[in-house]
Image: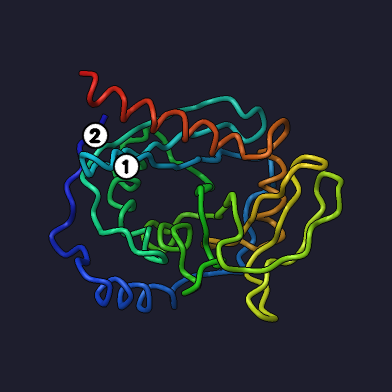
Amino acid sequence: MTTVRIPDDWPTTEEQARAVQDELRARVILDADGPPPGAGRVTGVDVAYDDERDVVAAAAVVLDASSLEVVAEATAVGRVSFPYVPGLLAFREIPTILAALDALPCPPGLVVCDGYGLAHPRRFGLASHLGVLTGLRTIGVAKNPFTFTHEDPDTPRGSTAPLLAGSEEVGRALRTRAGVKPVFVSVGHRMTLDDACAHTLALTPAYRLPETTRRADALCREALRETYSA
């Protein structure tokens, strides 16, 4: 487990954080062709908080994309690096997530974030922020649609409906299990929306949420428990 230090130049105010978003957003690539679903490696990242101690634990879990077996995993624990502000949550998590990714013994391949990419009020959610900082291909798969609207996708698995900000499609509601509430997929960096949805379906053979998210969620919670049980 890695202990994380917050960078000296990390934003401390909403104004500074929004300026960083404005600067980095211009670097997002939304239309690059990625590897086909089921090929290479895919990594899930997620975080868990201990609000009383102001601590966040991050996990990165690398899966073989064809078998969905775990290839490698790493965790990191550090201080929460920014106050809670809707739309700026990435600034609370990224230093610790980066530390977990850096601790992996192998390249992560495609990174799947439990959150948003383009489907963000400022079009720069965690998946986009992480992708621009690392240069990795990233997508966001969220449990809810944030502030955006959508029609209900058809019942069968694989059905989609546009996730809309007015007339702009910022992502898709994707049915990963027949008759079960959809997930909300958006491009992070260096990926098309069609490919992001295809990868999400490949990662959800049995459950609503991607295996990457399920494994990373369990691991970061375990890391947080172990930090204080020790």
Query: Which residue ends up furthest to the front in the rendered image?
Result: 52
Please rate how many residues cluster around mark 2, counting C-alpha atoms within 10 Å: few if below 14, some from 14 to 19, many from 20.
some
Secondary element at image label 1: helix
Q: Quadrant of the C terminus?
A: top left
Q: Is residue 22 above or below residue 76?
A: below
Query: Which residue ends up furthest to the bottom in the rendered image?
Result: 167
Q: Which is more N-terminal, label 2 or label 1?
A: 2
Q: Nearer the viewer, residue 205 or 64?
A: 205
Secondary element at image label 2: strand
**In which quadrant of the rendered view does residue 32 lie?**
bottom right
Q: Nearer the viewer, residue 55 or 196?
A: 55
Residue drawn where x is 66% and y is 80% of the image: 166
Question: Which residue has dot 1 on it?
Answer: 102
Task: Name the spot of residue 136 as percent of width and height, x first.
Answer: 46, 54
Residue type at the position of mark 1: Asp
Task: Name the spot of residue 110 as percent of width and height, x first.
Answer: 54, 47
- 91 on left or right of 113: left
Q: Are marks 1 and 2 in contact (CB under 8 Å)?
A: yes
| Mark sitting on residue 2 | 2
Query: Which residue ends up furthest to the top in the rendered image?
Result: 230
| Mark sitting on residue 19 | none
- 98 on left or right of 219: left
Task: Name the spot of residue 33 as percent of width and height, x first.
Answer: 64, 61
Please rate how many residues cluster around mark 1, counting C-alpha atoms within 10 Å: few if below 14, some from 14 to 19, many from 20.
some
The mark closer to the camera, 1 or 2, is 2
Residue type at the position of mark 2: Thr
Q: Is residue 68 above or below residue 121?
A: above
